[in-house]
Image: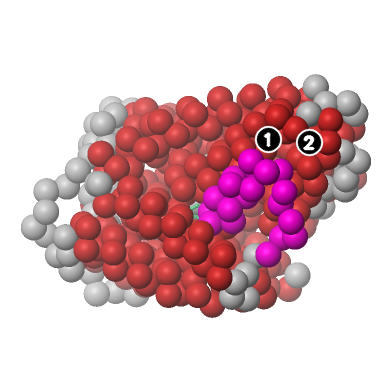
Amino acid sequence: MTTKREHFGGRIAVIMAMAGSAIGLGNIWRFPYMVGEYGGAAFILVYILCSFILSFPIFLTEAVIGRRTHSNAIGAMNQLAPRSFWTVLGYLSVITPTIIVSYYSIVGGWSIEYFLKSFSLDFGEFRPSGWTPLLFNTIFLGLSAGIVAFGVKAGIEKFNKISIPLLFVLIVLIMVYALNMPGAEKGVDYLVKPDFSKITGRTFAFALGQSFYAMSLGMGIVITYSSYIHKDENLVASGVGTVLAALMFSVLAGFAIMPAVFSAGIAPSSGPGLVYQTLPHVFTGMGASSPFLATCVAALFFFSVIVAAMTSSISLIEVGVAYLVEEKNFKRSTACLVIFAVTWLLGLASVFSIEVFGKVDAFSSNFLLTAGVLLVVLFVGWKMKKEDVRDEITNHGKLNNGIFEVFFFLVRYVAPITVITIFITNLVL
Ligand code: PHE
């Protein structure tokens, strides 16, 4: 390794970067719908439970690997378990995010297109595939890779430190507006009415899958970002901050989106349909009575989606870039260019076919991600020395000693069993 490694400048910077990766399309287009469909407040409870009992310890296992080795995902596994089966985890951790960013950035591109369309309030029909999406995808991907090229501190840290607070302000503004629309209560009911009868085994599988995706687990991101965390930083505190930020944003997004959807008398949907079909209807409807306000709300909303998606795609790109810089001695700018080119080429398949897009999304978020999570918990729970794990979580006995045993138990037994169950559920469903 020839390069001198950079570090994030403190806990706030770590939490902002991790939250930037976590907060994204998953929180905006999947979470609100899942809440409504799977039991309202009851689902939120299940989700919080899953986040703290499983996603949080899993987040910490990745953080342990990253911070202990101060290395990219492949380098980290080569250090901890050289020439063993476990290096697969390193490769998977670099391949998965590179595949994900190839379609994630297409959605980022749609958001730029819709942001521009907000100014005329003329959204037209939703055209997810073709030359226009390719153009906007290129812009979105180029901007994301460009920010990564500036480096960990001047690029990633700086962008997240501005974007995350801004995103919270924007989503609260939109929420206040939405909650004051006529008939907004029905949207609130949809999100909060607890219905425990809707909670089944499947709900748990969905809640967990969503929680893993939302926390960006199982794809080398937490490993890579944690490798930029200082030795004396408290990993547990950074993890709690990240879980809370992602959770809060999901709930706020729900209360910003669903009241508006119900106020317009439209049935809610999930996925791209919610953001690029349902909401444009809502904005156009609003525009009939107050075009200026509708334009502002629509533009602010799509701007937020662009920023939320960009903070996530930056984290996806950084995983591959860190690998190329550290293992292959690339210059950072060249590495960014290479990852840009590879993901752009991969994305061609998804940008011209929405079926391929759906398949790539399902394959990576159900299969690759779950496999990554499973390997990482097995590695930290069973292969690494328990004392090494303890050292990392407790900073050599200085912190968090009380929770270590609980954490380790969850990682060793509860997490693998649950993840295998989800894996099977995903295959069968
Ligand atoms: N966590 C992001 C979201 O909820 C998505 C994401 C997935 C980001 C994977 C990075 C990696 O949208």
Q: Is residue 311 above or below residue 169?
A: below
Marker disc for residue 429: none
User: Would you identify the image quadrant in which residue 317 lies?
Assistant: bottom left
Do callouts 1 and 2 mark residues in contact (Cβ within 8 Å)?
yes
In the image, is residue 395 part of the stretch drawn in magenta? no
Q: Residue at x 41, y 69 (%)?
A: 343
The amino acid pointed to by label 2 is Gly
Q: Residue at x 47, y 33 (%)?
A: 164
The amino acid pointed to by label 1 is Thr
Quadrant (top left, top right, bottom left, bottom right) of the N terminus: bottom left
Q: Is residue 291 above or below residue 200?
A: above
Q: Which residues are magenta?
A: 108-127
User: Which residue is denoted by mark 1 in the rendering?
Assistant: 295
Q: How many marks?
A: 2
In the rendered view, does 204 fall on the left or right side of 288?
A: left
Q: CA distance from mark 1 to mark 2?
A: 7 Å
* SS category of the residue bearing label 2: helix
Question: Which residue is nearer to you in this view: 55 or 417?
Answer: 55
Q: Is residue 197 above or below residue 286?
A: below
Question: Which residue is nearer to you in this view: 149 or 21?
Answer: 149
Q: Residue at x 56, y 40 (%)?
A: 303
Q: Position of residue 340 (x, y in %)?
A: 36, 65
User: Which residue is denoted by mark 2 in the rendering?
Assistant: 287
Q: Position of residue 420 (x, y in %)?
A: 60, 65
